[in-house]
Amino acid sequence: MRRVKILALVLTCMFLVSCQGVRKDEEKTSLRIGISLYRGDDTFINNIRSILEDKAKEYELEKGIKVTLDIQDAKGSQNTQNTQVERFISLDCDVLCINLVDRMDASVIIDQAMTAKVPVIFFNRQPVEEDMNRWDQLYYVGVDAKETAILQGQMVVDLYKEKPEMVDLNGDGVVRYVMLEGETSHQDSLIRTEWSVKTLKDGRVPIEKITGGIANWERSQASAMMEQWLAAYPDTIELVISNNDDMALGAIDAMERAQVTGVNVIGIDGTTPGLEALENGKLLGTVSANKELYASAIVELAASCALGQETPAEYPLTDGNYYWTPQEILIHEIKENP
């Protein structure tokens, strides 16, 4: 009987220590967040990074909890990113925010995180559904690619209905376009390409594709591609549909070198240089995510995971794991001739 009482006392003490440990976690006064970017020189990602830093400071001031962001650039290498995650875990990061290099190869990161019991918020580059379903501490913050593409197509549909001569530049009843695509493995690139064109067709814009190519989201690649197309199809291209603003700006660069004017160019992302081109009329339109909400969702979700709190109600999750950031059409204001 004496041994039973001693055992009961030991178990009670263990329980009390365990409860005190949870309480200590709940009263954390600092958070360390490991952030790995697929490429730090990507314009959109660089915009998000800057706002993430601002939102972390805002969270500190509002909650009184110090937030340390450990931001690393994977430079397009999944192996490098895997190593960065291993380092984050060894440094006792409370949560990981990962902009995947290869969305099809998230398993190593997930394995490491699950073993260490460190929650992960993926953003911008969405892991496949099978990976996301492996653990209840995996989240994704991004935009709905189908919605993005529909909005991109709709801006041209609306303009064509109101002022067809602004879209069908030569007035022959056909709008001839070229398509600049992102990476072949990126889900957003595939969906944006398909649904922007489908929206144009559904909106009864009489389109005809001249050519298209993969420029991997990069301005320089798109510029070189567009230069070739302008030479191969002189006075033919009326519309450039681009999967992002950087490639759209590359097409504009090529047109400026060739002294070609009047061609409509539409992008996606609402990046800082994209918005500048929109303002001065070089870019017809873009689709912009609310980047403030985008970055806030990442920081707030990361903090709630690290603190063991409920996910914030102001960022409602779809299917328990996904936060889709609101988007809007931004189009250059076309002024009537006096």
Image (cartoon, rainbow, N blue to C red):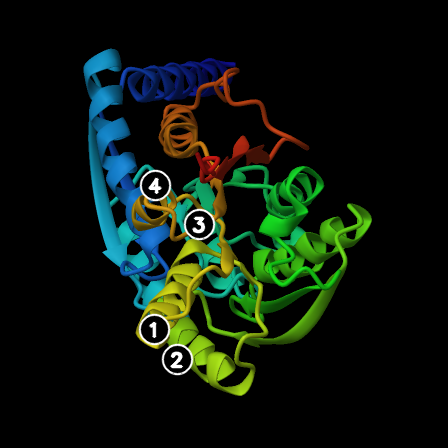
C-beta proximity under 8 Å, tags 4 and 3: no
Residue at screen point 49% across, 53% down = 267
The amino acid pointed to by label 3 is Ala
Side of 92 relative to 138 (left or right):
left
Q: Nearer the viewer, residue 56 or 276?
A: 276
The picture places residue 334, in percent across and down from the top left corner, at 47, 38
Camera-nearest label, 3 or 2: 2
Q: Examine the rendered structure and indicate whether residue 140 appears above or below residue 316.
A: below
C-beta proximity under 8 Å, tags 1 and 3: no
Residue at screen point 33% across, 68% down = 256
Camera-nearest label, 4 or 3: 4
Q: Examine the rendered structure and indicate whether residue 313 appears above or below residue 149.
A: above
Instruction: Determine the CA span between mark 4 and mark 3.
Output: 43 Å
Residue matched to label 1: 220
The picture places residue 11, in percent across and down from the top left corner, at 45, 20
The picture places residue 175, in percent across and down from the top left corner, at 68, 62
C-beta proximity under 8 Å, tags 4 and 1: no
C-beta proximity under 8 Å, tags 2 and 1: yes
Q: Secondary structure at mark 4?
A: helix
Q: Nearer the viewer, residue 46 or 135?
A: 46
